[in-house]
Image (cartoon, rainbow, N blue to C red):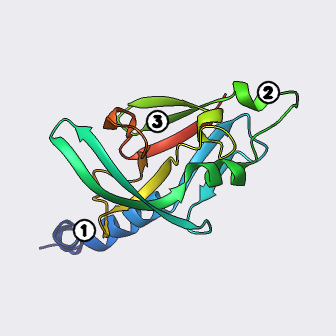
Amino acid sequence: MSHRALILALLLLFPVPIAAAQEKAAASAVEISGLVAQPGPVALTALPQKTVAVTQVTSQGEFKGSYAGVALWDVLAQAKVIDPGKGALLQRTVTITGRDGYAVVLSFSEINPDYGNNGAILATARDGASLSPKEGLRLVVPKDRRAGRAVRDVAKIEVK
């Protein structure tokens, strides 16, 4: 077996460390764009962790449990959403998109603790265990009765 073939075989047999590093990197930051003063990746590890209890109807039935991660409000605050004044923030929307293209829109007001305070988080764990690579970073809106606005594997957030 040639030296090249041996290296390829080893990489195919032992992909776990590489995949784990990629998974950890993907869950440690989220890309934010749009009407923010600091577009680009926001480091989630620097933000306070939060745990929320949920009871939601999913396609597999009712789910009762907890999710842990960072508050979406804290992520938006870190990116510094642009506020031109006179209630303009109340007209902003936040689009959260997964790697599969699934996207949901939340109003800035419903995320804001002074208004709707819906408690939305970007979760990295469920019931004390890290989310699978398939789920990646997950948007969870704990006050929703149905889990339709839960976005798996969040890839980007855009403020409009």
**What secondary structure is marked by label 2?**
helix
**Marks 1/3: CA distance?**
27 Å
**What secondary structure is marked by label 3?**
strand
- The residue nearer to you, when weighing 115 against 39, is 115
Residue furthest top as drawn: 91
- Where's the N terminus, which quadrant? bottom left
1 and 3 marks in contact (CB < 8 Å): no
Which mark's residue is nearer the viewer, 2 or 1?
A: 2
Which mark's residue is nearer the viewer, 1 or 3?
A: 3
**Nearer the N terminus, badge 2 or badge 1?**
1
Q: Which residue is mark 1?
A: 15
**What secondary structure is marked by label 1?**
loop
**In the figure, residue 51 lies in which quadrant?**
bottom left
Three-letter amino acid code at disc 3?
A: Thr
Q: Is residue 111 left or right of residue 21?
A: right
Label 1 Cα crowd, 10 Å radius (few <14 / some 14-19 / many 20+): few
Q: Which residue is depicted at the point 46% across and 63% down?
A: 25
Residue 103 point in image, percent of width and height: 43, 30
Q: Which residue is mark 3?
A: 97
**Nearer the N terminus, badge 1 or badge 3?**
1
- Location of residue 105 with respect to 128 vertically, above or below: above
Q: How many marks?
A: 3
Numbered badge on residue 88 = 2
**Nearer the N terminus, badge 2 or badge 3?**
2
**Marks 2/1: CA distance?**
48 Å
Residue 27 point in image, percent of width and height: 45, 59
Q: Is residue 82 left or right of residue 24?
A: right
Three-letter amino acid code at disc 1?
A: Pro
Q: Is residue 53 left or right of residue 115?
A: left
**In the figure, residue 12 lies in which quadrant?**
bottom left
Which mark's residue is nearer the viewer, 2 or 3?
A: 2
